[in-house]
Structure formats: C-alpha cells, structure tokens
Image (cartoon, grey):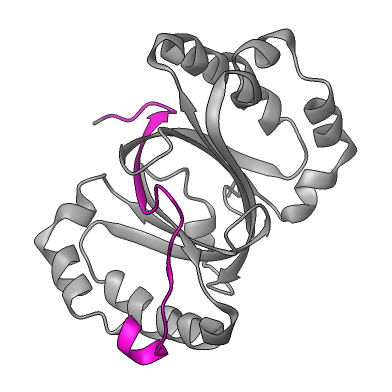
Amino acid sequence: MVKKKGSALLMVFTNIDSEHDFEFNQWYVEEHLPERLRAPGFLDAALYQATKGSPRYLAVYELESVAAMRTPEYLYMSENPTQWTQRIGPSSAGRGVVRNICDQISPKESDSDFMGRSMAPALQVGRMIVPEEIEDKYNDYYDNQRTPRNMTVPGCLAVRRYHVVEGSPKYTTVYEFEHEKVPESMAWNASRGEDKMHEYIGGSYGHATGSPGVYRRISPDRAF
C-alpha cells in the first residue's frame, strides 16, 4: 500500500482574481504540485475551490509529519521559487493568504485503509478560535460526541482535527466528504440540531473569517 496520509497538513488558502484563474490552475497542476511531491515527507496533495466560505482556493498537502516542512529539499524549494511561482503563486498573485501547518491531534491512530486513500473529493474546513479556559471541554465534546455523530451522516468519510503549529487560529477541523453537498443534506442538518457543544462547554468559541469553508476538489480532476 502506498501511504497517502500522514500526521500533518500544510494548508494554503488564497484568493486569486478571476483573470488569473486559468494560469494559476495551470501553474499548480503542471509545476507546483509535482515539485512539492518530490520533497521528502510530502505524501499527496490537491487543489480545492470554495463552494461556501473563503478564501476561494485551498491547496492541501498531506505530510508524513510536520518535520517535512524542515527538510533541506523543501527549504531549498521554498527559498528558491521558480519564475512561474514568483509570477502567479499565492505570495505574488494571491490576496488574503492564510498558510497553516497543522499537527493532527485526533484521531490518534487511523487504519491502513484510510491511510492509503487519496485526497477527498470535497472538504469542510473549520478554523476554530477556542479560548484557553474551555479547550479541554471543547476537545472532549468534539472527539466523543460531535465526531462520532457526524460520522454517521451519509457521505461523511472522515473527521480529523489539528493543532495549528504555524499560523492561526489554534484549531482546525477537516471533514472529508464524498461530495460538497453533504453539509446541505437533511442528515447533516439533523446532526447539527442534536449538537449541544455550547451547553456542554459553558463558553463561547467561534470561526475565523471565511470559516467554515466547503471546498470542491478541482485538481486532481474529479469524475463528477
């Protein structure tokens, strides 16, 4: 089995003006994706476009661990961008760029079948602002109540939660979906209606600007 998932993610959110869409997508598919996947510890990657929330684009890189961001090979790529990257990459053509390195905190382990799966057809990403005084209850409720309940919703393939070790806010939740319509389904809304997180934790938490975002995979291509 070829391992496709690790214990960390690099997530880069960006807005690209529509007149640059074609070249941005071409650059990502033809140059940037193959380049990054040559770096040690980069297991898989995909480009997504928002159907809800913002920023418009999300590039997700599955990492063996956060150490993949510190290898000489990756650092050389990062510090010596190609001419094409300098012209159309997020640092140049992007607006509202959010770059997060995420270390997985839940689940602690995943089965081999899941670790061999390619990038999901759709994602929902919650970038969560959680006050320190309610973190323990937030984590307990999410892992023992919210995640098990949401995993019963048809089309919900996986839920992974992360500490953001570079960037902000501190918590990120990534739902993997069969398609981007899952969070519009009756089953999903019913699950949300049963959620008692606010009552349980006795405090307030919230989303960063543009979160939660729902993202449809655009590269590699989907069959639907």
220 shown above or below 20 = below
* Depth check, front residue: 170 or 118: 170
Which residue is the extreme one toward the right?
Answer: 72
Task: Name the residue rendered at 58%, 72% in the picture.
Answer: 109
Task: Name the residue rendered at 58%, 50% in the picture.
Answer: 1
In the rendered image, residue 210 lying in the magenta stretch gets the answer yes
Quadrant into which the C terminus falls: top left
Indicate left or right for 42 with 210 as reference.
right
Indicate left or right for 67 with 120 as reference.
right
Question: Percent from the top left, x then y, of residue 55?
Answer: 43, 37
Write the start and end of the magenta stretch as one range. Answer: 198-223
Task: Name the residue rendered at 28%, 84% in the picture.
Answer: 196
Indicate left or right for 195 with 44 as reference.
left
* Depth check, front residue: 22 or 109: 22
Question: Percent from the top left, x then y, of residue 49?
Answer: 38, 33
Kindly indicate the quadrant of the structure image that contains residue 79: top right
